[in-house]
Every structure is written in structure tokens, then in C-alpha cells.
Amino acid sequence: MQARRVGEHGLLVLCDDAATVRATYAELRTRARELGATEVVPAARTVLLDGLADPEATSVLLASWELLGPSPDLAGPEVEIEVSYDGPDLDEVAAQWRTDAAGVVRIHQECTFVVAFCGFAPGFAYCTGLPDGLVTTRRSEPRPRVPAGSVALAGEFTSVYPRTSPGGWQLIGATSQRLWLPERAEPALLAPGTRVRFVGIQAR
Amino acid sequence: MTAIEISDPGALTTVQDLGRPGHAHLGVPRSGALDQPALRLANRLVGNEEGLAGLETTLTGIRFRTRGATRLAVSGATCDVRVDGRAMPWGTPISVTDGSLVELGPVITGLRSYLAFAGGVDADPVLGSRSTDLLSGLGPTPLAVGDVLSLGTSYGDPVAAEAVPHPAAPVLRLDLGPRADWFTEAALASLDGSSYTVGAASNRIGLRLIGAALARNRDTELPTEPMVLGALQVPPSGQPVVFLHDHPTTGGYPVIGVVRSADLPVCAQARPGDLLTLRVVAPRRAEQGRQPRS
């Protein structure tokens, strides 16, 4: 693993692609205690180790680690999210994907997504797994208020807004499931590594 | 039950302890007091564990009335402290009786004062912390007129004396990286020793610096990256932002360097208009391109 120093206590591990991030994150999270890291944070092409007492020594250690690459054993828990596909941007996404609204709904349900990383808000999960090349352009004007539970698309990702907030993603549906459960030991329904399937239900 | 009732929260007063690190992978900012040595000091002064929740005020102080007798101490930004109109010492434990009106005046030096109470502020913890996170809305809401905060009941003896630190020099020491290689040689050469003015839009999320733009050597977009406390992130404008405790856990702009943790209290206490000097202490540029062992 190749890593760069981040301040006094951090290391940023560089990865070639999202699959390598997933494998690296799984490995580093398992070994966080051994490494003395207080945070292990994945993102698009990097994984951060923070809170290290001696990042230089950890960097030398990591340089000797060989990742065997993502294996099926890394598959995390699977979560099913019920969606009523009636979002205001379905037609816009359909136009971008060169299909119709029914096509967007079908593709979104057929994919098995994996949470690549979280960010933007507690429990906001960047889920990968759309067919290659299927990307979604953000709205040119973000909405000041996107309701909690909105199922959304942007870039190569899909996500669900855990709480009402401003947002620029394209909205294709909504779920009544809670994404953020601060009273639980695992407060995010969608944590990095979790596999996600979306299931259509009739709007009530 | 001992409590305080807020008469005037000033410009912004929040409940803060040492934050909720360890959840960044779920998108949860660490939050917590911006000037942690100041909060720790105030807690020690009243006889608390260092990490108990206190109040962080901003610029204009706070006014509240006690319900029950308590002991309190003020640290961080200096200000006048009055109990029922009588001047009291800053940086020293003060015993107050039931029904006292406590006033912290506008800051004299610095920006944020810290107020600790014997037993700590007893708000509902979220993920193990009572800190107000202004980015994500976790923790207690910022204080409002009429709010009643109960105080804890477990505390030790106040300390007799404590060395109260002088305000630190207005210097931010930086370790370069992880993305210093995204910037021009000229930007990197000018960084050390350059001065920036603190912008008015600064808050608990970030300290905005206004000065010489830091130019990039490439136009490509950085894939979203994890962000650390103290990161000096450079948006396309070239005007850097220091990430403070409520910072987002990920970001899409390159980080040219990271402010040393010892200098974060300088960021916490810098006012809009203040001049801060950047000082590169660890270039580490030879390490930027380190290759993995084959």
C-alpha cells in the first residue's frame, strides 16, 4: 500500500479504483486497533488513517502489505430499501440515461449497490454499482430543501438523504425507512461496505 | 437540581465537550470545543474531569441566572465576568449562590470564551458526546433565551492555582501535504511566511483565509477525499480554508497542508480581520512520491 502523510497523525492510503478502496478499507478497519488508528475513513480513491502515534512507522509497515484484491468474503451486510419511485427528477434522469422513467426504475432495482463511503451528512452513503458509464449530472440549481428519505442520483452514485437538507442530487423516489439511528450502536443503516438493494413499492 | 437559565446567549453559544471522534467513516464530524486547551483548563479549575461539557461563547459573551448554588470558571477569550453586577476574576474558580445573575462581557482578546460548571452541562449525549455540531445538527441546539441547562452532580475540588496560558502568537504552523503536489512551485514557495486575513464567513466549520491565491498546476478534479482537522483546503478561488472541528468528513478540493494541532487554538480565537502568518515546518516533499516496496 502506498500512503501519504496527512499532518502529524494521519496517513492517506492511495488506491487505483473503487474496488481497491473497498478491500483496503475492509483490511484497515479490521486492523485499526493493531495500527492504533482512531479513524479509518474511506472515500472515492483514498482511505484515511487518523490518530496514529507514529505515522512514519505505520507508513513503512503499510508499504510491506500486499492486498490480494477484493474477494467475495469482503461482502458486508445486505440492506433492502423500499422505494416509491415517484421522484420529481425521474424524467430528467431518464433523458440523461437515454431511456424512459420505467427504465430508470428497472435499472435502479436490478443493481446490487455497495456503500463506497459516507460524507455530506451523518449516514449519507455514496453507493456504487450502477452499470459502467451510467452517470447522472447534478441539478444546476440545488434544492434548498430535500426531504429526508429522498432516493437520489449524482455522478456514478446513488444515495438516500438521511435528513432534510439542501441538496443538488436528482431525486427519483422516496423511502420511509430511517437511515440515521443515533440511538443504535451502529447508527448508520448504510455504512461503508454495506450492500444495498432498492425494491419498488406502490406510493401510498 | 442545579441548573442555569439563559437570559441572553450572545451571538452564538453552544454546548461543547471534546467531541465525538471515531465516526468519520459514517459522515459524522468530530465536533467539540474549538479551543480544547481552554475548555480543559476551565474544567480543571472547577474540579471536573477535563472532558466534561461546558459552554463555548462567541464574541459577545452570555448572560444567565443560576438555579441552585454552583461553581464556575471562565477561560479562552478574556472578558469581564460579573456576578450580580460585581466584577469577578477570569481564569479562576468562582462560587455562585442560587439565583445569581452571571454575565460574561464581550471578548477583550480572542473570540471564544469557555465556561465550565462543577459537574458539567448535562445535555443528552449523541454518540457519546454533548457537543453541538453546527454542520450536521447533532447534539443540543445553540442556546436560546429561556433555555434551562441542568448541571451534573459529580465533581472534585477546585484547583488552587493554575497557569493560564498567554495568547499564542498569530502563527499557523503547517505540515505540507497530502496534495501539495497539486500546486505550482510559486504557490508552494510563497506559502511559508505569507500572511492571510481571517474572513468574516469563518465559523466552527472552517476558518477562511483571505490573501495571495494559491494556484494549482492542474485543472483536473480531485475525487472526493477524507478530510482531517486542521486541513488547509484550497477551493478553485485559491483562498484557503482551515477545517475546524465541525468540518465535513470528506471534501473535493486538494489539501495543501495541515495545521499543527498545537495551533488550532489560534484558529479558534482568531477574529475576522486578524492577520495570521503561515509557517511551513515540515516540507516532507521527498516523501510525497514514496513508492510501495515491490
Image (cartoon, coloured by chain):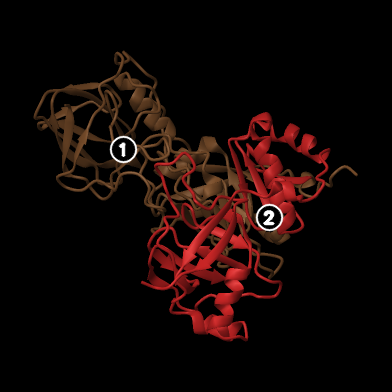
Label 2 sits on residue: B188
Place residue B45 in its image quadrant. Answer: top left
Disc 2 sits on a residue from what chain?
B
Outermost front residue: A202
Report whether A106 appears left or right of B265.
right
Residue depicted at x 64% and y 31%: A33
Front one among B37 and A200:
A200
Place residue B140 in its image quadrant. Answer: top left
Q: Quadrant of the N terminus of chain B?
A: top left
Question: Can residue B30 be seen from the camera position used here?
Answer: yes
The chain coloured red in the image: A
Q: Quick check: A1 above or below B122?
A: below
- Please provide percent x and percent y for residue B167: 41, 34
- Please provide percent x and percent y for residue A167: 45, 68
Mark 2 lies on a secondary structure that is: helix
Disc 1 sits on a residue from what chain?
B
Sort mark 1 into few (<14), some (14-19) or many (20+) by Cα contacts within 10 Å.
Answer: few
Label 1 sits on residue: B124
Identify the hue of chain B: brown
Mark 1 lies on a secondary structure that is: loop
